[in-house]
Image (cartoon, coloured by chain):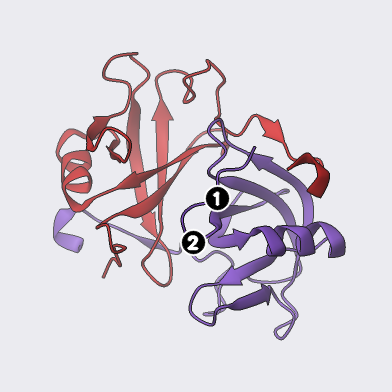
Chain colours: A purple, B red
Amino acid sequence: MLAFNEQGLVPCIVQDGGSREVLMMAWMSRKSLDATFACGELVFWSRSRKELWHKGLTSGNTQKLLELRYDCDGDALLALVEPAGPACHTGERSCFFRELEGPHGL
Amino acid sequence: MLAFNEQGLVPCIVQDGGSREVLMMAWMSRKSLDATFACGELVFWSRSRKELWHKGLTSGNTQKLLELRYDCDGDALLALVEPAGPACHTGERSCFFRELEGPHGL
């Protein structure tokens, strides 16, 4: 039903279930998805560290799973969450805190 | 500033700027990003057809760009849009119309 990519991953969009703000995007493997359902908080696959990444386990900024949705072709997830703190490592509430002003901003 | 992947693509989350509903996720190349800024409507890269994909050009369900954001590590985009119609080819307003009930739902 889910279409994991050639690395066995699927992107997961994280949205605040209350404010509806999009907080971040990260990747999930089948194992991280199982872990997410098991503990009720978002667990991703860290592509840089190549290990399971229980979001907020160190910082305290966990994301409680409210609802998990998947798209029409099964290759993207949308997690509605209740965040315990900022999603971004910079301290911003959302990782998407910067605007691209146009092609010259690239 | 943007970190395109090894295929020269970056995922783009599409959110309704009014209702804040997450509508879909698709991929952008540098060319599709240029085209998006040039025409003011979302233009993706179709990975299956391997061509630029001006969303809604056939169906009429275009997505007018209101604001384009990028995340802290530059490897994901968030487009706030005003949609002219449903985002999904099924006719649903959002592609994320199904809920994953648990690991057994996979």
Is A4 in front, or is B96?
A4
| Residue occupying the point 33% across, 35% down | B48
Instruction: Give the vertical position of B55 relative to B36 (above or below).
Output: above
Q: Residue furthest bottom?
A: A58
Q: Residues within 10 Å of mark 2 (few under 14, many from 20)?
A: few
Instruction: Give the vertical position of B22 relative to A87 (above or below).
Output: above
Residue B92 visible, this orientation: yes
B54 vs B104, left or right, is left
Is B100 in front, or is B57?
B100
The quadrant where residue A41 appears: bottom right
Q: Which label sits on residue A4?
A: 1
B65 vs A2, left or right, is left
Amino acid identity at mark 1:
Phe
Question: Are the residues flagged by discs 2 and 1 in contact, CB closer than 8 Å?
Answer: yes
Residue that carries the numbered disc 2 in the rendered image: A7
Q: Position of residue A99 (x, y in %)?
A: 34, 59
Amino acid identity at mark 2:
Gln
